[in-house]
Amino acid sequence: MDKFGDMADQIAETWKDDSEEFLDALKREYEALDKIAKERNQHAVMYYYPASGDQIRVGNVRLYPDSSILVFYGDDAETNPCVAIVPPQNAQLLLKIVTLQEEPDRKTIGFGVAPERTGSEQ
């Protein structure tokens, strides 16, 4: 492989490691906030703010390590289902504790890493 191909592979591998660290840190921060929320009988929530100015309440976060992309699954302000595909460096997120009158059952955010694709899937 040429020197640029090698360099691109190194950069991709470094970014992949950073993306997984980002997801781990995000999960740790959410879990810490959720623990406080439970003690207060409240909810920890996460919002993603895309450049469009919308607000998405996140219900699930998935990392695709082969492309270092985060996917946020959630609902917009009108409760329409949304999916946002975002590089971690562009993830404008807000974690906060709220009292939700309309949701008697606590909903926790799911975090996951998608399985890496094999050569036959690409």
Image (spheres, rainbow, N blue to C red):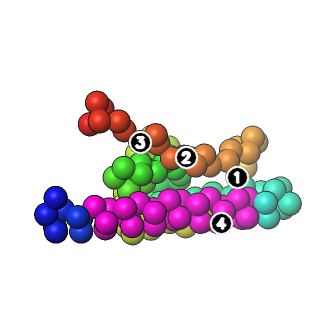
The range drawn in magenta is 9-34
- Circle 2 residue: 112
Q: From the viewer's perspective, is 44 left or right of 79? A: right
Residue appearing at x 58%, y 60% in the figure: 24
- Could you tell me the amino acid type at mark 3? Glu
The answer to whether the residue labelled 3 contacts the one labelled 2, judged by CB atoms less than 8 Å apart, is no
- Does label 3 or label 1 sit earlier along the sequence? 1
Q: Quadrant for the C terminus, please.
A: top left
- Circle 3 residue: 116
**Local SS, label 2:** strand
| Mark whose residue sits in front, 3 or 4 | 3
- Circle 1 residue: 100
| Mark whose residue sits in front, 1 or 2 | 2
**Local SS, label 4:** helix
Q: From the viewer's perspective, is 103 left or right of 15? A: right
Would you say residue 22 sits in the magenta stretch? yes
Q: Quadrant of residue 34?
A: bottom right
